[in-house]
Amino acid sequence: MKSDTLANPGPLGLMGFGMTTVLLNIHNAGFFPISSMILAMGLFYGGLAQIIAGILEFRKGNTFGMTAFISYGHFWLTLVALIVMPKMGWIEATPETFMGWYLFLWGVFTMFMFFGTLKSNKGLQFVFASLTVLFFLLAARDWTGSVLIGKIAGFEGIVCGLSAIYLAMAEVLNEQYDKSVLPIGQH
């Protein structure tokens, strides 16, 4: 089967990322506590669905999509593990300053991935630029203990997640109708 006859797995990965990111950042913005709903989304839609999308991107020969979706899928799995395993008594909780380094490294990775979007559409560029800012804000929150930075990160993360949802639905609808129903700023 030729790779151009395969379905686009990008919207699946973007939705898994986008919806989970919105929910976690509604929590970060202070609207509700972290709960099993966020953790389940992190495991299955943010984690598993993105990994599946990444494997499908591999099949299509898309190195960027494969790297992004498999990496961020595993981000969600590790984040849930970092939250759940201490609660189960399996490991000690990671100190917030150490979590800052975890988030900072994800920010560095995302910044490099952003450079990979510069030949892509403006929608994808915005997702990666805003995600880079989000990771650095979350790292700053954990390093400083600032509630204000955490709330700012939460609102910025909601915007980031919504932008991924928009891009996912634009890709689906634009392909379905074979025209630009939702613009994404073609490069």
Image (cartoon, helix red, strand yellow):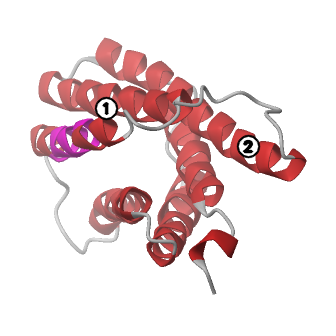
Return the residue at label 2: 169
Answer above or below: position of 128 versus 10: above
Magenta stretch in the rendered image: 102-111
Answer above or below: position of 27 versus 36: above
Q: Residue at x 58, y 40 (%)?
A: 23
Location of residue 132 in the rendering, given as x and y in whole percent from the top left corner? 31, 32
Q: Secondary structure at mark 1?
A: helix
Location of residue 52 in the rendering, given as x and y in whole percent from the top left corner? 53, 73
Place residue 78 in its image quadrant: bottom left
Q: CA distance from mark 2 to mark 1?
A: 22 Å
Left-right relation of 52 to 81: right
Answer above or below: position of 64 versus 1: above
Q: Residue at x 63, y 69 (%)?
A: 4
Q: Secondary structure at mark 2?
A: helix
The amino acid type found where label 2 is placed reads Met
Question: Which of pointers 2 and 1 lies earlier in the amino acid sequence?
Answer: 1
* In the foreground, 111 or 90: 111
